[in-house]
Image: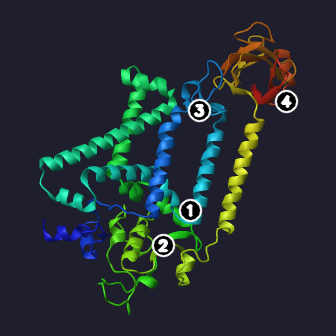
């Protein structure tokens, strides 16, 4: 490697910290190859919280498809099931049909608002603890550490030639990652079909080909994103680091280095005094444990996921040198500006920003709840023929075609009747039925499509007031008399 190439690469210290190349180096190339990060195992309160969150979230993800929910004889008994074959989503007692996808939209809106609220309160708390990318990356790092040792052991191993020891440890690491990835992909496909049935089919090779395709895709993405790419996903692929800056303010709780207390930094030896210097001994323990390979002492950075492992590492060092904890801590921009040392002094949760998010969350949740409680158990939709819009009959009359879809949202057979109101003289003609007032039978949890023509005699055409007369189609439940309706149009020549 020549001198220019050496200048151009990002410099990586023994602790994994990265420093940017000089301006002269950037003039040669703006690209630097990825430098592998070797995060050291942190020990402390926040590391324990992350272990607990990982166990809970992975437990929910892997076990949820196996939880049963009795819906009656002949019905799926999986509590959470994305039943695409029957165009519905099952969440315990709640059944969401394809026509009701706006409920899924509502859930996504609630998730986004919840993320906005969490960010305004405590920065990238979601990224640091509960984001799937963080959880699976943490798991992959733990497996890597199990086979290859902690940070220093991994550095030594990567510096060795390819001996049997190195090959075996690397192979066992990647095989373990693949096993986790297969379990991850397998758990995900279980959400789309009855888990025990699909599990047996997958083992015996009798599952639908689409199940194997998606199992392979989910396995590959988990292996690449969690095991190989890791921090690259958070830095380059995820848009949230570039958005979350708009969600925080002076009162947001963020992980920060107290430079007023820590500077000037310098190494410390036992027996020396602390006069004329800060508490930071420049040990770089905070950098060594960082899964993103950054130095929190350089201030707020896009790469920081606020995982708080640097707090644990720094507190451990402070305990050793007998200095107060929380040199790195959760604090607010306002506290840092006011040069306070208390990690939560002046922290306000209730402020205009959080009130707005909480109000919107309450409003959306209330609307969704009210809609779920008052939604009908049957639904009518009407699709008017577009080609042709109308047909002129031999007697001068007009004909419009419609596809009427009747959705029965209960698990029993039901009977319905259709009624039409519009221009005087309008008569329905059903393709599948005789007469103008048939009874339409719809099976349990089914959607039945009925083809209907609306006919207008030639002598009535002169009574039309426009080329798009309103027509109301009503659907009546024969058993209980409940009604729903839709409005469409009857088209005619200009």
The earlier-in-sequence mark between 3 and 4 is 3
Q: CA distance from mark 1 to mark 2?
A: 17 Å
Residue 445 higher or lower than 160, as above or below = above
Q: Position of residue 488 (x, y in %)?
A: 76, 29
Q: Which mark is residue 119?
A: 1
Q: Position of residue 359 (x, y in %)?
A: 71, 58
Could you say whether the residue bearing mark 4 is in a helix, strand or loop? loop
Res 399 visible: yes
Most foreground residue, 24 or 139: 139
Mark 4, residue position: 465
Q: CA distance from mark 3 to mark 1?
A: 31 Å
Q: Residue at x 39, y 71 (%)?
A: 316
Mark 3, residue position: 79
Nearer the observer: mark 4 or 1; the answer is: 1
Could you say whether the residue bearing mark 2 is in a helix, strand or loop? strand
Q: CA distance from mark 4 to mark 1?
A: 57 Å
The earlier-in-sequence mark between 4 and 1 is 1
Q: Residue at x 61, y 73 (%)?
A: 347
- Left or right, residue 379 beside residue 153: right
Q: CA distance from mark 4 to mark 2?
A: 74 Å
Q: Position of residue 159 (x, y in %)?
A: 16, 59
Q: Which mark is residue 235?
A: none
Q: Which mark is residue 329?
A: 2
């Amino acid at each position: 490697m020549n001198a220019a190439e050496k200048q151009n690469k990002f410099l990586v210290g023994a602790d994994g910290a990265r420093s940017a190349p000089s301006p002269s180096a950037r003039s040669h190339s703006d690209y630097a190859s990825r430098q592998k990060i070797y995060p050291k195992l942190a020990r402390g309160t926040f590391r324990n919280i992350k272990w607990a969150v990982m166990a809970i979230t992975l437990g929910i993800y892997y076990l949820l498809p196996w939880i049963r929910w009795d819906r009656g004889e002949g019905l799926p008994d999986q509590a959470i099931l994305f039943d695409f074959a029957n165009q519905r989503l099952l969440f315990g007692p709640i059944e969401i049909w394809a026509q009701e996808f706006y409920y899924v939209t509502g859930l996504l809106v609630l998730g986004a608002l919840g993320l906005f609220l969490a960010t305004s309160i405590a920065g990238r708390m979601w990224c640091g603890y509960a984001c799937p990318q963080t959880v699976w990356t943490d798991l992959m790092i733990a497996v890597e550490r199990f086979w290859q040792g902690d940070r220093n052991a991994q550095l030594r191993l990567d510096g060795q030639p390819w001996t049997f020891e190195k090959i075996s440890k690397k192979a066992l690491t990647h095989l373990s990652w693949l096993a986790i990835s297969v379990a991850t992909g397998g758990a995900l496909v279980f959400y789309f079909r009855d888990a025990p049935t699909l599990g047996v089919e997958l083992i015996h090779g009798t599952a639908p080909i689409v199940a194997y395709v998606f199992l392979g895709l989910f396995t590959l993405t988990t292996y690449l994103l969690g095991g190989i790419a890791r921090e690259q996903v958070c830095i380059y692929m995820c848009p949230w680091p570039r958005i979350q800056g708009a969600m925080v303010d002076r009162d947001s709780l963020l992980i920060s280095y107290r430079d007023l207390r820590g500077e000037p930094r310098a190494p410390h030896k036992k027996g020396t005094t602390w006069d004329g210097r800060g508490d930071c001994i420049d040990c770089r323990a905070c950098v060594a444990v960082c899964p993103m390979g950054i130095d929190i002492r350089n201030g707020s950075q896009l790469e920081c996921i606020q995982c708080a492992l640097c707090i644990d590492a720094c507190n451990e060092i402070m305990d050793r040198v007998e200095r107060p904890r929380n040199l790195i801590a959760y604090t607010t921009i306002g506290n840092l500006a006011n040069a306070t040392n208390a990690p939560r002094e002046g922290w306000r949760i209730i402020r205009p920003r959080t009130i707005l998010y909480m109000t919107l969350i309450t409003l959306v949740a209330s609307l969704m709840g009210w809609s779920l409680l008052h939604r009908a158990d049957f639904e009518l939709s009407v699709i008017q023929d577009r080609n042709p819009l109308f047909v002129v009959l031999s007697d001068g009359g007009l004909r419009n075609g419609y596809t009427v879809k009747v959705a029965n949202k209960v698990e029993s057979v039901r009977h319905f009747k259709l009624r039409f109101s519009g221009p005087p003289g309008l008569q329905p003609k059903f393709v599948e039925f005789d007469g103008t007032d048939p009874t339409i039978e719809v099976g349990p949890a089914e959607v039945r499509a009925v083809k209907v023509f609306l006919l207008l005699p030639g002598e009535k055409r002169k009574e039309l007031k426009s080329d798009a007369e309103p027509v109301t189609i009503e659907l009546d439940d024969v058993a209980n008399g409940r009604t729903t309706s839709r409005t469409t149009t009857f088209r005619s020549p200009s």
